[in-house]
Image (spheres, grey):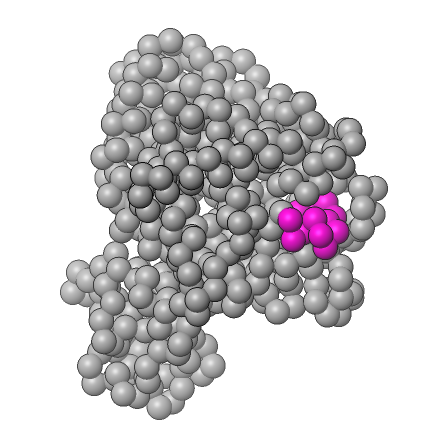
Amino acid sequence: MTIWTPQDDGFADLSSHDTFATGAPHNTFARLRRDDPLHWTEYAGGENYWSVTRYEDITAMNKNTEVFSSARGIRMEDQSYEEYLARRTFQETDPPEHSKVRMKLLKAFSKTTMAQYEEDIRSLCAEILDQALAKGTFDATKEIARQLPMRMLGRVVGLPEEDLPWLVEKGDALIANTDPDFTTHVLDKMDTDEFRMMPFNSPAGAELYVYAKELMEAKAKKGDTSGVLNLILEPAKDGSTITETEFRNFFCLLVAAGNDTTRYSIAAGIQALCHQPELLAQMQAGGEVWETAADEIIRWATPALYFRRTATRDVEMHGKTIRAGDKVLYWFISANRDESYFDDPFRVNLMRSPNRHVSFGQFGPHVCLGMWLARLEVTVLFQELAKRISHIEAAGPHKFLRSNFVGGIKELPVRVEAA
Amino acid sequence: MKVTWKLPDGSEITGTAEAGQSLMEAALAHDVPGVIGECGGTLSCATCHVHVAPSWVEACGGPGDFEDAMLDMADTRSEASRLSCQIEATDALDGLVLIVPEV
């Protein structure tokens, strides 16, 4: 039984957010991997771009930051240089500049540091699951997947619990700025020029700026210098600091990116449980499966569908020439289904090992800082879920986010039977 | 060159590294658990951290400035700590022994 069947005809428009509203166009990616691994797209929304779809190419290019730079923007949409400066974080920089900032945060997000949150996560999961499962039939994205990362964000970043729903709503308005369910300022459907200096062209960016400023002022008043927000303000080894704009953008990044990606990994995992019934039994058997399950669920989900780079010089590849200044998209969603690298990539195999997927942007300097937190949240959530249910099934059709940047199931009706 | 990784559980993996390959890449090729190399050798993650066996410390040399700063972020840094993505396989290191830290 397949978990869901791709709807596209093999020639989907990758620039169109509507394409992804019925799930990623895997038939198109499969054709591109086979026939046109460096694909040129005429883009109505701006400068044309290259799409890279093979695992082997993406992993090789991702580490080559001298040729493929992040410092011109990381999404398909074009940015003027002043927009880039106003909206960038260290995500939109290259080594060594990037590494100076990243280094300040590495320890706070290391595997060992994150492991200390395990019991916290477990008790949050218990609370969230007991509440949701009691309903019998419910939207698993809303009641489960959305809850855990949101509440962990509060603990890891140091934000008041009562502010979290508002923050996550704003984070969604930023990152899901192409889906009318999440914002009234839909990026490709209206003129958002007024907000072009804000993260994601979104008025929610301005609200988060104000929030971040007030939060840091309140912390300073109390003499509180704890948490990752203060860490990033520390001078680097060479004495350099980040600007106030960069700080506020970093705050937006934490609230947005630190949230929906784990949410959509959990949702994809729950959806897989509904359609591949042996998965629940494997989870219930426990033991070694937990060493590999989270990575497979995260490979399966691939919430960050692509990131963009910009060529710094002419490069020959697959008989074509990428010109200096061309935009190049790494489609992680395609690499994670590459049949020439993964055995049976369209099947969830919780025991897959090794599982060198690229959902976290691995094999490059921008590999997800929050990956250990994400893995831990996914592991513990499914451990606790598997304990509590004897059966789970779809209770209606699911709905995908309208976005070619973030892939996720935004509505997931399920029916459960308690264990 | 031949290289041996000593694992936290007491077991060992021995394999070859091609000249020019980094010891992180070699570890991945031999599926050495605990050497992850998530950033692809771009000095951004410290997940390929190893301790060089005492008799090999001199031959391997010390970390570069940036590597040194990154190693400060590793959980179990020692005098013999290196990021294995920054050690290049050469004939001079034939027989190298690396100790994989527990993470």
Residue A78 at what x, y percent from top left?
A: 74, 48
Q: Quadrant of the C terminus of chain A?
A: top left
Residue A413 at what x, y percent from top left?
A: 49, 16
Question: Among all residues in the image, which is located at the extreme left?
Answer: B10
Q: Nearer the viewer, residue A256 or B53?
A: A256
Please, is residue A228 above or below residue A170 in the view?
Answer: below
Residue A403 at what x, y percent from top left?
A: 65, 33
Residue A77 at what x, y percent from top left?
A: 72, 45
The range drawn in magenta is A74-86
Please, is residue A359 above or below residue A313 in the view?
Answer: above
Residue A268 appears in the figure? no
For the point 49% across and 42% down, the residue is: A251
Residue A147 appears in the figure? yes
For the point 28% across and 49% down, the residue is: A113
For the point 40% across and 32% down, the residue is: A149
For the point 49% across and 13% down, the residue is: A395
Say which quarter of the image contains residue A37.
Answer: bottom right
Drawn side of residue A169 relative to residue B91, left or right: right
Picture mark count:
0
Please, is residue A20 above or below residue A332 in the view?
Answer: above
Say which quarter of the image contains residue B15.
Answer: bottom left
Decide whether residue A81 is among the magenta residues: yes
Decide whether residue A152 is among the magenta residues: no
Question: Among all residues in the image, which is located at the extreme front?
Answer: A221
Q: Nearer the viewer, residue B14 or A195?
A: A195
